Image (spheres, grey):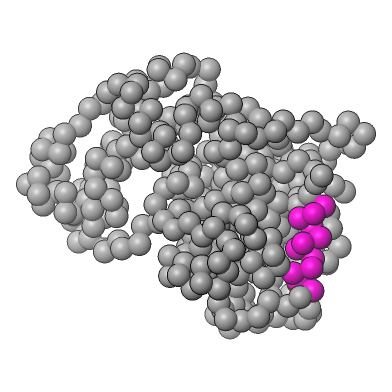
Amino acid sequence: MPEARCLRELMPDVPEIMPNSAEKPNPTPLVVGLVYDGLCTFEYGIAAEVFGLQRPDLDHELYRFTSVSINEEWLTAHGGLEIKASGTVTDLEKAHTIVVPGWRGKDEPVPEPLCQHLRTAYASGARILAICSGCYVLAAAGLLTNRRATTHWQYLQHFQSRYPEIDVQDNKLYIDDEGIITSAGSSAGLDACLHVVRCDYGVKVANAVAQRLVMHSHRHGAHAQLIERPVAEINERHGIAELITSLRANLSDQYHIASLAERVDMSPRSFQRHFLSFTGIPVMQWLVQERLTMMCELLESSDWSVETISNKVGFTSTETMRYHFKHMLQSSPSEYRKTLNLLTRPTNRD
């Protein structure tokens, strides 16, 4: 059996894994970012920002971070940059988490040595996270066979046709299947990386990391990929953005389309159209997702009852909340909380 790794969130049958008392855990797990020719610098930067940045605002270092290439000493990245990895393949053997940025092309072959290194690392207990088209690397290595996975919406059809043995799920931000994590488009990689931090250190630390990134603290993997998001006019964008900030701060209140439209000086029909354009989903569906996201955070960070949390985030009844929770998260609130209690924080293998 491989060492304990972060288990996917919604897994009611997760077995409890006991730590190996013979090993002394290292408090700073090693995260390795893979680099290769044609590297997407933005996606690599996501990993470096989340796992490699010093965080003096927290009481201890969260991760050690390094980059590894398995071939050339100097590589060419997108944007005309030349880069050189700071680590060696030995770091792959020590890593608790390996991040695979978007691959250089969906039709580009993946070198077998890279595949072998990833298979060996996973078998030894490493958690592996692929951002966007990085899923092609994991698939070539055979790590996604008979697993659930997702990727950017533009690749979904091609990826499924090439790898029919993979359960490709569309319209998901990320999927964690027993330590193999795949994510949608580039920005969804941030959500997947925050999911890793959240599994490792809990919701408060993940929120602190998200705050420094100036982003919403946690979007669970069941959030839809927002495919079409036309840019709103500046005055519309400003009004709806302020409204969204206010709604997030007051989720326990009850809202109606007519009163929300009045707050941004629009007709109900115009408001619904512009809100959909700005967020990608209808306003009432957005409210449900925000309430579920906050509920998930409170299930982890508080000892309040499910009924109390349901009321605090604004659901009109426990039955309504349970319906939406089951529909979106394929779990009950009690099962979700139980799963969080079974998550095992990683220990380094140095």
**Residue at the spot 22% in from the left edge and 27% down from the top edge:** 254
- Residue ranking furthest to the left: 267
Q: Nearer the viewer, residue 60 or 13?
A: 13
Placement of 10 over or under 194, stated as above or below: above
**Highlighted magenta segment, given as a residue range:** 113-124
* Place of residue 115 in the rendered image (x, y in percent of width and height, measured from the top left): 74, 69
**Residue at the spot 48% in from the left edge and 34% down from the top edge:** 331
Position of the N terminus, as image quadrant, is top right
Q: Main secondary structure of the magenta part?
A: helix
Can the viewer see residue 44?
A: no
Placement of 242 over or under 135, stated as above or below: above
Q: Is residue 283 left or right of residue 66?
A: left
- Residue ranking furthest to the right: 22
* Residue 115 located within the stretch drawn in magenta: yes
Q: Nearer the viewer, residue 179 or 55?
A: 179
**Residue at the spot 81% in from the left edge and 33% down from the top edge:** 19
Placement of 204 over or under 266, stated as above or below: above
Q: Nearer the viewer, residue 126 or 203?
A: 126
* Place of residue 122 in the rendered image (x, y in percent of width and height, measured from the top left): 76, 55
